[in-house]
Image (spheres, helix red, strand yellow):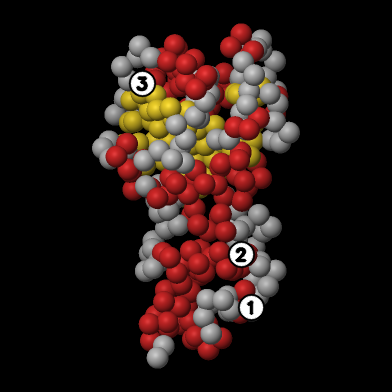
């Protein structure tokens, strides 16, 4: 727990609707930035910089820092603190609405973020849409979500998020951050996760849309066996054929199937559907 003095800037009232919990421990901030392993040729995309706990450290290491912040009041603070630095670019807007394609079209990009809990999953999926542009992402998120992202098959936390994100990145659970390191204190513990986008799973599914539908259906009723959970995707005969081709037992439940099993099953299902009269 951080026991240092609270900066004067923290007198600004955090917006509960934006799920704002500002990191106030500089030691934790440094650990997060160090985990990003930035060099001078890297461009850093910071999501939700808040008052800039990470921003100054990023500017020390990266060739450029692009910060996306939705709160106008915080944008004003960021402009005052970092606006004179030519390496700093501030985008005032919602990261879920910002067009990332043109923004990260050139250069080597690394994402660093203390993500608001309420938008963690949609932000992570947005990053995977442009995963070929990112080297890695180091994000602080709710501990329970971090455990799901990094979970292995056969354990309780393994689920849709584990499978979908592991298709495009290798996740690594780094360390936990206690509530006392934030203002205001969140009710839950946070954790820092690193996603390595340079090591996507191979081979990729032949049809990502079929793969996505398969995973969502499987985990949508995770207590059911696959033969029952996947009924909405194809007739029983087609599912049996796909199961035999993929070598995946339909009596298994979703949490027992590894990523490679879902990929094989999705490819086999695609093939069976194409062959069906």
Question: Compared with residue 197, is residue 108 higher up or lower down, i.e. above or below?
Answer: above
Question: Which residue is outermost to the bottom?
Answer: 277
**If you read the primary sequence from the N terminus, does the residue marked by circle 3 or circle 2 appear first?**
3
Q: Is residue 228 visible?
A: yes
Q: Is residue 118 left or right of residue 199?
A: right
- What is the spatial separation of the Cα atoms under label 3 and label 2, in whole angstroms? 42 Å
Is disc 2 surrounded by few (<14), some (14 to 19) or many (20+) residues within 10 Å? many
Q: Which residue is mark 3?
A: 88
Tell me what residue is drawn at x 43 percent, y 27 percent: 92
Tell me what residue is drawn at x 39 percent, y 24 percent: 90
Q: Are marks 3 and 1 in contact (CB under 8 Å)?
A: no
Q: Is residue 243 visible?
A: no
In which quadrant is the N terminus drawn?
top right
Q: Which residue is mark 2?
A: 219
Q: How many marks?
A: 3
Residue in front for this viewpoint, 264 or 186: 186
Q: Is residue 5 left or right of residue 30?
A: right
Question: Compared with residue 127, is residue 54 higher up or lower down, i.e. above or below?
Answer: above
Q: Which residue is mark 1?
A: 228
Q: Give the x, y percent position of residue 127.
A: 43, 45
Q: Secondary structure at mark 1?
A: helix
- What is the spatial separation of the Cα atoms under label 3 and label 1, in whole angstroms? 52 Å
Q: Is residue 173 left or right of residue 55?
A: right
Tell me what residue is drawn at x 52 percent, y 80 percent: 234
In which quadrant is the C terminus drawn?
bottom left
């Amino acid at each position: 727990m951080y026991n240092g003095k609270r900066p004067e800037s923290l007198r600004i009232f955090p917006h509960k609707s934006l799920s704002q919990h500002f990191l106030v421990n500089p030691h934790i901030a440094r650990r997060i930035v160090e985990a990003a392993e930035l060099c001078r040729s890297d461009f850093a995309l910071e999501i939700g910089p808040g008052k800039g706990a990470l921003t100054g450290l990023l500017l020390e290491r990266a060739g450029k820092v692009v910060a996306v912040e939705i709160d106008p009041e915080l944008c004003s603070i960021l402009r005052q603190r970092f606006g004179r630095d030519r390496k700093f670019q501030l985008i005032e807007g919602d990261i879920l609405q910002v067009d990332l394609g043109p923004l990260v079209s050139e250069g080597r990009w690394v994402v660093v973020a203390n993500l608001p809990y309420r938008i963690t999953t949609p932000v992570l999926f947005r990053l995977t849409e442009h995963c070929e542009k990112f080297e890695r992402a180091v994000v602080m998120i709710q501990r329970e979500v971090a455990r799901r992202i990094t979970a292995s098959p056969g354990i309780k936390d393994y689920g849709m998020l584990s499978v979908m994100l592991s298709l495009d990145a290798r996740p690594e659970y780094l360390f936990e951050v206690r509530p006392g390191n934030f203002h205001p204190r969140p009710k839950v513990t946070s954790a820092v996760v690193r996603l390595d986008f340079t090591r996507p799973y191979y081979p990729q599914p032949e049809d990502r849309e079929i793969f996505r539908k398969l995973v969502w259906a499987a985990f949508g009723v995770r207590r059911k066996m696959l033969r029952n959970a996947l009924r909405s995707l194809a007739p029983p005969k087609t599912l049996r054929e796909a199961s035999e081709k993929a070598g995946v037992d339909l009596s298994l439940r979703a949490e027992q199937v590894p990523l490679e099993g879902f990929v094989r099953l999705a490819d086999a299902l695609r093939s069976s559907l194409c062959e069906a009269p």
